[in-house]
Amino acid sequence: MKNTLSTLLFLFVAFNLITNKSSAQVSWPIVFESKSGFVTTMYQPQLESFKANVLEGRMAVTIKPKDEDMVFGAIWFKAQMSTDIENRTVVLENLNIIKTHFPEMVNEEKSKKFSNFLSSELESWNIKMSLDRILASLDEVESIKQLSDNINNDAPTIYFRTTPAVMILIDGEPILKKDESIGLEYVVNTPFFIVKDIAKNDYYINGGKFWYTSKQILSGWKESKEVPLKVREFAEKNIVENKTDSTAQSYTEFPELIIETKAAELILVDGEVDYKPIDSTTLLYVSNTESDIIMDINSQNHYLLLAGRWYKSKLLQNGNWTFCEPDNLPTEFKKIPDESEMVSVKSSIPGTDEAQIALLEQSIPQTATIDRMQAKVEVKYDGDPQFEKIEGTDVSYAVNTDKTVLLINKVYYCIDNAVWFMANSATGSWDICVTRPDEVDQIPPESPVYNVKYSYIYESTPEVVYVGYLPGYTNSYVYNGTVVYGTGYYYNPWYVNYYYPRPVTWGYGVHYSPYRGWGFSAGISFGWIGWGFHPYGRAYWGPRGYHHGYRRGYHHGYRHGYNRGARAGYAAGSRNANRNVYNNRNSGVRQTGNNKNTRPSNSINNKARPSTGKANNMYSDRKGNVYQRDQKGNYQNKSNRQGQQHNKQTKPNNTQRNQQLDRSHQSRNQGNHNHNRSQQYNRSPSRSSMPSGARGGGGGGGRRR
């Protein structure tokens, strides 16, 4: 067809016009109408491969010239992913058209001109898509495999209470530091406020409106009605003021204090255990707790979900909790209906759609573009630099700094918020790193710097470095078909003059929320945690990366059931895009990808828009033939081959082609479904921001309302 080439050129310029609108995601299909009356429609991409930050796929395309037959074809593309996990968006940048398939376009010279034209224009073409739609499409990519991390799943000590209680965690044996000016000592290795009045030899704990006193740190705590003025003033000066949650406000009696120095979790039930049935199953769940507790009637076992791991016990009170392999869960777990209060746990049940989505999220990197001239890091040590060899590797790491510093082959590497720097000495000066050492992949989960193996350098130019990190960098790992939090190992902190904690797994009610990732159960009150003498408090929960590591912060007021939106689901899960650690001017992160200021797009006097009337029902097979799916599930072959019968109907059968088309259709529908749920969550008025200064949650539960 004589005008096909010019129409195709208009088609790809239309990409430029549509996809540079940074405020909106692309809705499919996209329709473009030229001055000459050509109407071009582009359908949602079908993905074929995903490696590092590069996606490859294909798209079905239709072109309808005025007064002529419609042309059907496909294009193959390769693009660099720029992701914003916080806002659940993906931008496909630097789009390269690998191949086109329009059967009637047989002129090789025109094809070459077409390809050259595209190559000269692609740098400004960016497609903004929903992460949830990308995740569903990735389910079609056969090459994505999730390998299990060799983590520790031993059960922590589990405290069970039916009356108000708070667990105070101390990182090992208490370390006291003296403030000479006021005659007080405070416990360094905890995010809780624990001080000692040296003159009276009394200890004090403050949490929200409650004060406690004891003659010893680990036990004997009771209500304190008289608190020395200097202790109160010390607290007012150093405790970050946070809004007390409604659970804490409802307490009229002092909750019990449980002081723990080792791995532990607190499970709170509001009074006598209230079992309720899970419809369509032989399961019960405990309804008056924020914890995920399910009872299997057949075995009489209770199953408790902690940090993405399942533990079982016959008893709740004084239970003998043991780890349950995910694939050994009762088969009834997979039958939990979407309308159930306990639907949220399906993300931790292998083989469910929710678990598959969670696994796919583990393969999506958070990306950034680092300006090589502006990116800087400063490393301070508590004394002279001290390095410790990681057993079984060629890597050593610095133990006396709050930064991650590695020594590999006589070169020093600092990984700060997932950005790599290198130097010839432990103290710098530090330059941006453009090559990630292979030895990093040797680091085992027993090491406190295990997470850095999930931070990557993709490529570089003389001006910038493209980097990314997977959820493993923020302590989210894969185990046996599920996503879990933390390695389960205890890492010794550093303390001489300064206290440098290591990432922890247990003690803060970490739980997984679909669409929101990991969060903390704040339990009784924000006021229990995050006081000002702990500038490194965030290290308890690992590095933040370009965005806060636990991108939802607290889930205070945590509720089961995301299917009803956050109004009754995860009621106060917070999003922390505003806490991007690179928001400051000298960060070295360029505003690209989802926050980009790209060069102006080519301007032509044509109109491109998302379609409001056309169904997103065109698919291409791996050969580039285009099929339209009708409401009955039949496919029509729309490829315009000369001499071939058009619109030949192909009913679904067991052929590989139709199985692939059905899979594309299912993933497209699933992506739309997940996207709508995610949007509902984001729009919910019940979500609240993480309070200023907060870095984690207190152990425990609260009330289900």
Image (cartoon, rainbow, N blue to C red):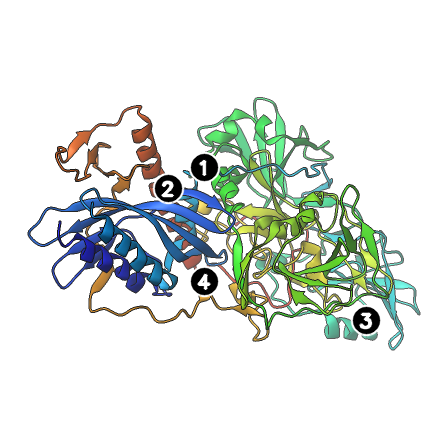
Q: Which residue is mark 4?
A: 593
* Amino acid type of the residue tagged 1 in the rendering: Asp
Q: Which residue is mark 2?
A: 670
Q: Earlier in the sequence, mark 4 or mark 3?
A: 3
Q: Earlier in the sequence, mark 3 or mark 2?
A: 3
* Amino acid type of the residue tagged 4 in the rendering: Gly
**Residue 66 as seen in the image, left or right of residue 343:** left
The residue sitting at 34% across, 38% down in the picture is: 664
How many other residues sit within 10 Å of disc 3, few (<14), some (14-19) or many (≥20)? many
- The kind of secondary structure element at disc 1 is helix
Compare residues 604 and 318 and report the one nearer the observer: 604
Q: Earlier in the sequence, mark 3 or mark 1?
A: 3
Q: Can you tell which of label 3 and label 2 is closer to the viewer?
A: 2
The residue sitting at 64% across, 63% down in the picture is: 694
Compare residues 546 and 357 and report the one nearer the observer: 546
**Name of the residue lying farthest toward the left:** 67
Q: Earlier in the sequence, mark 1 or mark 4?
A: 1
Compare residues 672 and 649 and report the one nearer the observer: 649
> Percent from the top left, x then y, of residue 289?
59, 44
Q: Which residue is mark 1?
A: 353
Q: Earlier in the sequence, mark 2 or mark 1?
A: 1
> Percent from the top left, x then y, of residue 295?
58, 30
Q: Which mark is residue 323?
A: none
Q: Is residue 183 above or below residue 510?
A: below
- The kind of secondary structure element at disc 3 is helix
Is there a contact, CB below 8 Å, between mark 4 and mark 3? no
Q: Is residue 211 above or below residue 157?
A: below
> Percent from the top left, x then y, of residue 627?
23, 38
Q: Which mark is residue 231?
A: 3
